[in-house]
Image (cartoon, coloured by chain):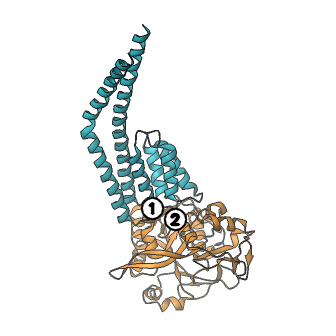
Amino acid sequence: MIKKEELLKIFSSKIRTLLSRLDINYELLQEIRLRANSPLFIIYDNKEYIVDCDGRLSDSIKNAFYIDINEIKETMEYISNFSFYAFEDEIRQGFITIAGGHRIGISGKVILDNEKIRSMKYISFINIRLSHQIEGCADKVMPYLYDGVGGCFNTLIISPPRCGKTTLLRDIIRQLSDGARGNKGLIVGVVDERSEIGACYMGVPQNNLGIRTDVLDCCPKAKGMMMLIRSMSPRVIAVDEVGSDEDIKAIKYVMNCGCKLIATVHGNSIEDIKNKPILDELIKKKLFERYIILNNESEIGHVEGIYDKEGLKIY
Amino acid sequence: MNKLIGAVLVISSCSMLGFYFSSELKTRIDNLKELKKLLILLRGDIEFANTPLPEAVQTLSKRHDGTYKEFLENISKQLLDLKGESFASIWKKGVKEYLMHTSLVKEDYALLNQLGDSIGYLDKTMQINTLDLYLEQIDRTISELSESVKERTHLYNSLGIMGGIFITIILL
């Protein structure tokens, strides 16, 4: 459930008033887009709308509410909790995750230091992507993830952006941790680099990740995976959006330690991942035993197929 | 008899006034020392834990049990509420509402207000440098006051008593 009041708090007073007037179901709200000197857009139930000056959804820019740069500045102040310094790393990466696990993408003028991104100023574009916790969304895939001897398979969730891979991962973690379909619960370690999975607030997950889950919040994935193995003895490790060279080394380390891994990656198919220079090795060596492919053709989070380590479709 | 009572009253009240000013001076130094301690803690929270301001101020309010407790509690509450007000405005209102009863003087309030204007929107290095600058200013004020506190206390006390005697003589 999205806490409406909590979400609206991050907006400037004017935008807050407008959004609070909207007669919508917040569970279907996907994105809110703020651009300086442009209308206020929202993506609701897979469709783009413009918010007008009376707080109604519209398809035309007539009577649209135009966003002033000061509205963006005020909103940024609330998003960063009045503390830009505390989000330096996130701003450098272009996004901040706020309470509730919602991801705020930002864009503006980038400040470079020796060709490296140092910071960002004149932030003029904000995209709020709402995180949805859907308990039970992994029910369909769970039977294919248990190995039948008390553990689970190394699994890779492959999906393009905005197809619900983090939501699915979150529910898989919860079900593995609590125990599902007659299987005992497993100790799950989560490396939540962007605070999207657990949406931790002061270290405590705000989303339900199960009763046997330990979360390492805001920690780089590769380092976090090693740390969890040494410190929390997990049976399963879960990470979101792997892809770097370091991640792959850490994944191999996890698998060599006898731990199982559930990970997500951006892509459209197994073939697509095979063509990626770093990830292809994992596929060729058949380190993953299950691949879940998602798309948003009929609905967000639609499971296109589940494949075994040979690439054969089993669902 | 009445004249004697009047004379005693005038002298004692003038002396009290002198003592009041000298004790205010000492309390001002204590208040500034407390403020310095708080800013050092805030600086540490920013530098080593990257704590956002609402949380950092809340932690300070729990750890601190002196002059600034009410001020810090109210500020952190308002910052956490996110009611549509900027940090600087919440901070300045807090100074006006909760710190006017302290022994700080106009220039200290001005310094505090300036501090409210320059926290939050800077990057970490700049933020630390700004806090260091304020800490330096507070340090300077404390050392200046401490150097002269003996003389000034003596001066206020003597002026109070002498002033009382002087007024009594004139009145008699």
Observer-nearest residue: B111 or A241?
Answer: B111
Query: Label 2 neighbourhood size at 10 Å, few (<14), some (14-19), many (20+)?
Result: many
The residue indicated by pointer 1 is: B120
* Residue drawn at the location 34% of the way across and 18% of the way down: B169
Chain for colour cyan:
B
Is A148 on the left or on the right of A193, as rendered? Answer: right
Q: Quadrant of the N terminus of chain A?
A: bottom right
Query: Label 1 neighbourhood size at 10 Å, few (<14), some (14-19), many (20+)?
Result: many
Q: Amino acid at mark 2?
A: Glu
Chain for colour orange:
A
* Residue drawn at the location 28% of the way across and 34% of the way down: B152
Observer-nearest residue: A37 or A3?
Answer: A37
Callouts 2 and 1 close, C-beta under 8 Å: yes
Q: Identify whether A280 is placed above or below A31.
A: below
The CA span between labels 2 and 1 is 8 Å
Q: Amino acid at mark 1?
A: Gly
The x and y percentages for residue B55 are 48, 54
**Which chain hosts label 1?**
B
Whether labels 2 and 1 belong to a single chain: the reply is no
Is A164 on the left or on the right of B99, as rendered? Answer: right
The residue indicated by pointer 2 is: A77
Q: Quadrant of residue B127?
A: bottom left
**Which chain hosts label 2?**
A
The x and y percentages for residue B136 are 30, 53
Outermost residue, top direction? B1
